[in-house]
Image (cartoon, grey):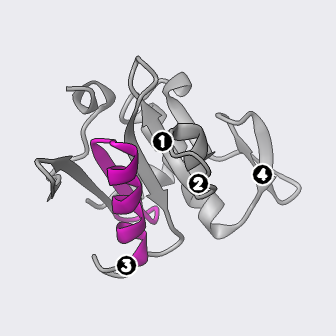
Amino acid sequence: MDIASAFKRCKVKEKDGKLFDPIRRKYVRAIPEEYVRQKTIRFLRNQLKVPSDRIVVERSLSTLGIEGDKRRIDIGILDPDGNLTVVVECKCSLVGDSEPAFIQAQDYLTELHARYFFVTDGVIFKGYRYRYRCFEQLEKIPGYDELLT
């Protein structure tokens, strides 16, 4: 799914080479991947209507239930009970479906028992649902309410 036009409308507050992260409520270093992450956060909030208190950023897997695992997810979306339902992997560029970002997101999804994963570079947004031990590519990006069903 091409989301370049939607991402262009997502404004990121920048100051002194840093970007404001509205979820972590602090400025973070402005690197290419961080631009993608910050625009994705705004896209999730504005377009998919994900409540801010349901978004987690740069969260270690150990805080999400995998003890001792220091790897981090870029963005997660929680259900109303606080369970992880979506893993979002942000990259500054994607190259095909064999990209390590897809493998990484799939690993996180199965280990964390989430139902969806998204991978984006700010231009392409690919979504997958994990059901019956299979990954199915989504035809459209579901809104927050749809992600919960």
The reply to whether dot 2 and dot 3 touch (C-beta < 8 Å) is no
* Amino acid residing under circle 3: Glu
CA separation in Å, label 2 and label 3: 22 Å
Residue of label 2: 69
Residue of label 1: 76
- Residue at x 49% of width, y 54% of height: 8
* Amino acid residing under circle 2: Asp
State the image quarter where residue 137 is shown: bottom left
User: Mark 4 vs mark 1: which is more N-terminal?
Assistant: 4
Q: Residues within 10 Å of mark 2 (few under 14, many from 20)?
A: few
Image quadrant occupied by the N terminus? bottom left
User: Mark 4 vs mark 3: which is more N-terminal?
Assistant: 4
Residue of label 3: 99
User: Mark 1 vs mark 3: which is more N-terminal?
Assistant: 1
Mark 4 or mark 2, whichever is nearer to me: 2
- Residue at x 42% of width, y 66% of height: 104
Inspect the magenta stretch and tell me whether residue 119 lies in it. yes
Badge 2 marks a residue whose secondary structure is loop
Q: What's drawn in magenta, residue-wise? A: 100-124
- Residue at x 41% of width, y 55% of height: 108
Residue of label 4: 28
* Amino acid residing under circle 4: Val
* Amino acid residing under circle 1: Gly
